[in-house]
Image: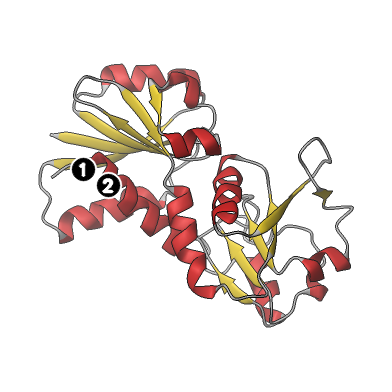
Amino acid sequence: MNKLGLLGKNISYSFSRTYFKNKFEVENIKDTTYENFDIESIDLFPTIIKNTKGLKGLNVTIPYKEQIIPYLDKINKKAKAIGAVNTVKITKKGKLVGYNTDCYGFKHSIKPFLNTNHVNALILGTGGASKAIAFTLEELGIKYKFVSRILSEGIDFSYDTLNENDIKNHQIIINCTPLGTFPNIHEFPNIPYNCITSNHILFDLIYNPEESTFLKKGKENKATIINGLNMLKLQAEKAWSIWNIK
């Protein structure tokens, strides 16, 4: 029996397990299972590798997309450039190879909505997912700035310093923070929403709830809103093709 799974912390809500369970049923894939590996700390990861017979691959989610890198034998060129891994393939020889499929999922989710005025973006948050978003925006020729709670090296704005003009000048705003995820659905990034217009795209990596408070506030100002569901589906299928289990 081939085993796949999701590595993360507090992931009982996870999309991936349900997605792959349904995929296996619909496509009549009988010899593969998918389970959650919910660990408190990344140093428990080698135990999973050692004790899980038939493990062929993993998806990796918050907070381990960067922390997993030292445990891998090899990292795909794109994942290395991004500095974050969300897919691991375990080779026949037992080697662990890291990939990033977030960039693929994001690129193909946002591309249909882009037009000529979408030249500058704000990335809210600085975790592993935000690195894949930044990499993809570069590929698309879109300039970006990072927004975080605290100003530090590589961070362009804090939420306190972000002003109305900054919102007007950046017509793509991507939420890479967990703010607003179920069950804390009333939370949202603190930005000047009153300056958002119909020319803006608000993209939220969150998919539960389907319409986060961040997206609702964008919708009220006629922005185009996109949640993270399609991105997740695309990156999941990309991961499946990397594992290539028939």
Residue holding disc 2: 240
Image quarter of residue 71? top left
Q: Is residue 123 left or right of residue 151?
A: left
Which residue is denoted by mark 1 in the rendering? 244
- Report which quarter residue 224 is drawn in: bottom right
Residue 140 image offset from top left, x and y in percent: 56, 59
**Disc 2 to disc 1: CB gap under 8 Å:** yes
Q: Secondary structure at mark 2?
A: helix
Place residue 93 in its image quadrant: top left
Residue 166 at what x, y percent from top left? 83, 63
> The disc labelled 1 sits on which kind of residue?
Asn
* 230 horizontally vs 192: left or right: left
**Does 168 sit above or below residue 206?**
below
Viewer-side residue, 210 vs 204: 204
Report x, y in % for residue 14. 42, 49
Per the image, label 1 sits on a secondary structure element best described as: loop
Residue 238 in view in this figure? yes
Residue 183, visible in the rendered structure: no
Q: Is residue 20 above or below residue 120?
A: above
